[in-house]
Image: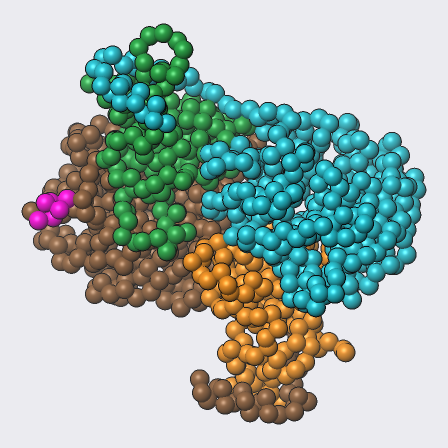
Chain colours: A orange, B green, C brown, D cyan
Amino acid sequence: MNWLDNLTEKFSRNVARTSSRRGFLCGLGGVIAGGSIMPLLPVARAADAEQPGPPTVDPGDPATYEYWRNCAIDGYLCSCCGGTINSCPPGTEMSTITWIGTCKNPGDGKDYIISYNDCCGKTSCGNCFCNRNEGDRPTYRPHTSNDYNWCLGTESTAYHCTVNLILGVAIK
Amino acid sequence: MNWLDNLTEKFSRNVARTSSRRGFLCGLGGVIAGGSIMPLLPVARAADAEQPGPPTVDPGDPATYEYWRNCAIDGYLCSCCGGTINSCPPGTEMSTITWIGTCKNPGDGKDYIISYNDCCGKTSCGNCFCNRNEGDRPTYRPHTSNDYNWCLGTESTAYHCTVNLILGVAIK
Amino acid sequence: MLKQFLRFMLLLGMTQSALADLPIDKPGRIETLPVPYPNDWVIVHDVAFDHMSVGRFMVLDINGGDIKDFFKGSFNGGFIAAFTQALKKPEMYVLEHYYDRGTRGNRTDVLTIYDRATLEPVDEIILDDPKLKRAEILVSKFVISLIDDERFLLFYSFTPGTFVTVIDLEKREVVNGVPLPTCAGIYPTGKRGFSSLCGNGSMVSFQLDEDGQVTEQGKIEPFFDVDRDALFERPAIIGDTGYFPSFSGAVQEIDLSGAAASLGEQWSLLNDEDREQNWRPGGAWLAATDSTGRLYVMMHENGEEGSHDYPGSEIWVFDPDSKTRVQRIPLTLPAIAFDITMGDAPKIVTTNIEMSLEVYDARSGEHLNTIADFYHNWPLLVYASQ
Amino acid sequence: MLKQFLRFMLLLGMTQSALADLPIDKPGRIETLPVPYPNDWVIVHDVAFDHMSVGRFMVLDINGGDIKDFFKGSFNGGFIAAFTQALKKPEMYVLEHYYDRGTRGNRTDVLTIYDRATLEPVDEIILDDPKLKRAEILVSKFVISLIDDERFLLFYSFTPGTFVTVIDLEKREVVNGVPLPTCAGIYPTGKRGFSSLCGNGSMVSFQLDEDGQVTEQGKIEPFFDVDRDALFERPAIIGDTGYFPSFSGAVQEIDLSGAAASLGEQWSLLNDEDREQNWRPGGAWLAATDSTGRLYVMMHENGEEGSHDYPGSEIWVFDPDSKTRVQRIPLTLPAIAFDITMGDAPKIVTTNIEMSLEVYDARSGEHLNTIADFYHNWPLLVYASQ
């Protein structure tokens, strides 16, 4: 889904109109210029984990606009809807047909292929609307277009929120 | 319908919080204390009309909270929805089963029996929500209770907006 | 935090090849909720007044710091649905209806049964008797009630004929429609019955048998003047006693323990000073209780005819035994509704006039939390989760 | 006004008995709208993004002073409906679907036909072929098109198989589903045909016979690079020519007059200075024309990869014959979509980033009006009323 990132504007007309028009508030996160890759809340996952092997890094707060995996998101973040970054809220169904983005993890510098899966079957979550369009292309190339309702192959096509799943590291 | 007169608050948090909590903004009208009966926009209807007989007065703007006939209204004013004070918007159906209020016309000093008829069959109009409860009583006395959805006897009971019709002058 | 940050800087210092790829995510994962819900979870009815066909109920953790912490899930309710929940089994009930073209076309009335853990509809009971269509009333919790150890679900029907419809939840079917005189409200009464307030200031009571049929009726002759000082139909029920506030600030106790309701004491929420300042009860939901049986009533100053729906600026706490006020809790923002969580650390959850929720310690009155960001919603009624 | 006021004071001075009772109102009155709608009326799609099952279309007079003046009526559209309107008969078409339990249950797809005067649904065509389910695309007007003098209605189907479904509006039935390669957009072409843009940068064209069956196909081999500089699928169509802006600010003309689309000239919206400032086209609806055939494109500064949906701060006006910019219209507030009214005094109507509408004189660029108070709505796409 697309072009709807201005809602918070409507409810915050007292917010300085000089703020960036490009990135819009998402949830309780702040407005971040699209190009910024500095993690706000660095979290070194593997450093706290117990399994052996080389560490991984996944910096940022998944419930914010600026989180790196959200680079082509367009909809409500399931993290704000009773789900998580990669799981749907209770009572919804995850779409198996998705659009794809390629997002750079600022923690390890790698480009990851991200699948944006819609969670479906309940009315819109309404929380943490985010729209970023890096790599988004028009509807005539569906698999990279976030303007479609991607609740497809599900019992109900009613859109609720969107998770993003790592499919792998992109081959340059 | 009831208790929903605070919506505009939500969208105007920068408005001074010291303003009256009793009367709430309705459409583009102002906040008026419930007891006020001074007409804001005096309109002497019959004075402009051509039929003979004694004149009538009906002061005020029907699309405002403070208009005298709205003394027990609870819902969206049809005047703001493509209808008028006494006619429904296109494509809706007027309920024939209603609740009743008694409102004083500040122009002639008479108490009128007002029937609040809901217009039904489309989704909520959403404009000019008004809630005043003079003479409103709990749901165990339905004919003077505005907490019900009064879209009854219509093909669809979906609520859209409310008109108010003069049924006659109240007998003291 | 500093420690984390140093670790992170350390990791950044490594060569990229020293960092493993993030793991591939498994598709299809769906969250479930713990049952029973913690005491500090509430269920909030978003009535969606301007999109009534698609209201919903939100399960919220009132301790949440921001929306991703407090939002646990949601389930739909069509057209100002009515809601109640079982405590002995993990079921929640939504009384709702749908049109096959959204707001027009053929209507289907249904009691939808949701599972508390999965928030999925697990069953539905079709309600097709045209004379028993439910009343759509925005803010009465007492349009729907569970009685008989949660076996029967009762709901108020208004077409504008008035009935109480009886659903047997074991048989999953409607077993009766009890005709009412001009009355409303369903207050559980006695072993397997209910009472309703009536338009002439009286109260009627009914007892049902195991098949949901009426076996006994009772009546309290008119005991209040609806024009001069109406009772709110939204009491707090503490034990077997209903505490019904009146528009002017009286409280009428009604004993609901017997086969028929009987009149209890009447007393006042107000002292002389309160009366001078015209304090009155009011709001969309204005009375509640807690695990210790105290009575909480939402109050506003400068009351007058028509002010019974005004937002409350304070919640007053009474000891119903001594009939004395034990506390005044000023609200950070005036509120239109509230409920109180169960357990040993009860909390007041209000819907304020900005349609945000606020959390107060019910003991100290301290303001604990604000739950905002309901951008396009109408989170009108709060239900403690158990 | 003073005269009226004096009259009123005079009336107040009379004894009450000298004033007649106000007349009793007749129940049951329903308004209707004038057909054709005046030039200054628009139809605005409230997509209700957070209550998608119940979006709607609002008929608005853009000269209105406040909401009671500008709001003329509304009709529903379920689940990001698609909308188009006939000009030769008073019909408007809403492509939508419904679930029998709101957002779940059995799905019914339908083309609902509304009467322009009464805003009542006068007919519907059930769409029950599972492989021809419509694409739900938030902001493309070209997912639905009328061709053949408004006899055939075409819509884009995506399941994710891609088809163009052909409805015969006279027979009121689906007569064909034309399979597409990976393409989208329905641009009326030739006598009774359409073209679509494709994922490999090509374009396909089809001509239909009187039964809606394909008689001719055409193709423009890949002519643009989707990765490097994609064409928006939302052109302005002026006469028989489609003007397709590209992400970077080029315009590709496509001749749609023949049986198959053919490539026209390519030119740039930008001069060197514009390029330096990184001006680009963008928005939810970013191109339109007026009765004199000028091309309007919404533009934003400091464009970059991913900025194609950014709100526009200006609308630039071009003479398509000379391919030169004739005007820059700065917007009072950045906008995400716009359309232009027909007639001799065209007006630009934008949806600004506060979800209010703004009206500008399309000739002078002067700001004329703001239409606000869409409290809980998403008035996303503007349609000139004819």
**Is residue D97 or residue D315 the one in the foreground?**
D315
Tell me what residue is drawn at x 44 percent, y 31 percent. B78
Residue D301 in magenta stretch: no
Q: Quadrant of residue C174?
A: top left
Residue A142's place in the image compared with B7, above or below, is below
Q: Can residue B123 be seen in this view?
A: yes
Q: In which quarter of the image is the C terminus of chain A?
A: bottom right
Q: Give the range drawn in magenta.
A: C273-278
Residue C367 in the figure: left or right of residue B8: left
Predominant secondary structure, magenta span: helix
**Is residue B26 or residue D237 the one in the foreground?**
D237
- Give the image location of residue B2, x and y in percent: 35, 39
Tell me what residue is drawn at x 54 percent, y 65 percent. A20
Residue B155's place in the image compared with D43, above or below, is above
**Is residue C158 or residue D380 the one in the foreground?**
D380
Residue B74's place in the image compared with C386, above or below, is above
Q: In which quarter of the image is residue B150?
A: top left
Residue A51's place in the image compared with B38, above or below, is below
